[in-house]
Image (cartoon, rainbow, N blue to C red):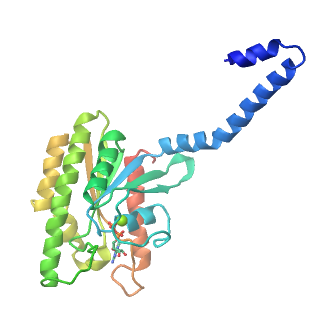
Amino acid sequence: MAHPAARRRTILPGSSRAAVGATIAGGVVTGLASAPERLSRLFRRRFPTVAVTGMTGVGKTQLADRLAGRNPGDGVAEVGSAVMERRTRRSPRLHGFRFLVVPGDNAATRLAALDEVFHDEPVDGVIHVVANGYATPRRTAGTTGTATAAREEQLAAELEDWAITAHRIASMAVRRDKPIWLVIAVTKADLYADDLEDVVRYYSPGSGSPFGDKVDELRALAGGAKLSVDVLPVSSQGGDRSSAIPAKRAAAMVDALATRLAQLSGHV
Ligand SMILES: Nc1nc2c(ncn2[C@@H]2O[C@H](COP(=O)(O)OP(=O)(O)O)[C@@H](O)[C@H]2O)c(=O)[nH]1
Ligand SMILES: [Mg+2]
């Protein structure tokens, strides 16, 4: 709509054509300037969003980096983050993903991030990352107790963290008609390659394990038809060819996870 001032100006003889020309040119320039931004907003909206949750040090950032095709270590290499990290996996025909990595600790920012992904702008799916008690402590302020005790503590911490996240997923699921999916990514598989099957079972629904029981509770709360649950082993790091999980196998595990995400999102 013409601005009153502009309309008034067009009545004045002589200046009318210039005023109209300026308005049109201005409109075109504005249009061009905002087009890429609008376009990228459109793309972002079309990519399914995925919350990446899990306690600090389990390997969320590295996994999101691998899924996004980023070189781990391209950015900050610090373990643990107080802010939400965003990664995009770009694939042809809009078959990409937007990953939102929720901080593992730091109470206030974590709560805000959980609100964002599970309430304010609910995500399409969730990757909950666990590491069989091999979370890297954020602060290495002296070691207490034996390695086994430390791992048991870490497993207990994973369970506690999962209880909080599972509760948020349940309330998101009951609020929505749309089905959501959950992938429990059992990462750092290179650290326990020989026990992989047992470890995956520990994190699986119906396993009778403390973690499995909580997954069952979540499914009962959310409604089985509304929430799909997958448990997939993965490793963001591979060793050399002699290692239990060589780099090639680690890459294949990341690819398998990405393929499953695509299936869950109806991309394939
Ligand atoms: N061995 C092994 N270490 C890993 C793997 N993924 C991550 N890490 C290490 O675990 C630590 C924590 O990883 P990070 O992604 O920062 O965890 P976050 O706090 O959950 O984001 C880092 O030192 C990583 O190098 C993995 O698959 N295998
Ligand atoms: Mg991180």
**x and y, in percent, of residue 233 in the image:** 30, 66
Query: Quick one: 176 or 101, which is closer to the camera?
Result: 101
Task: Answer with left or right where residue 67 lies relative to residue 122.
Answer: right
Ligand 1: which quarter? Answer: bottom left
Image height of 261 relative to 256, above or below:
above
**x and y, in percent, of residue 15 in the image:** 86, 20
Q: Give the quadrant of residue 105.
A: bottom left
Quadrant holding the N terminus: top right
Q: Name which residue lies at 53% across and 54% down.
A: 91
Query: Quick one: 169 or 112, which is closer to the camera?
Result: 112
Task: Answer with left or right where residue 21 lies relative to residue 212.
Answer: right
Can residue 204 be seen from the camera position used here?
Answer: no
Can residue 77 be seen from the camera position used here?
Answer: yes
**x and y, in percent, of residue 184 in the image:** 27, 58
**x and y, in percent, of residue 109 in the image:** 31, 54
Image height of 224 relative to 185, above or below:
above
Q: Name which residue lies at 80% across and 15% down.
A: 10
Query: Quick one: 264 or 155, which is closer to the camera?
Result: 155
Image height of 242 relative to 20, above or below:
below
Q: Name which residue lies at 15% across and 42% down.
A: 221
Most extreme residue toward the top, as rendered? Answer: 11
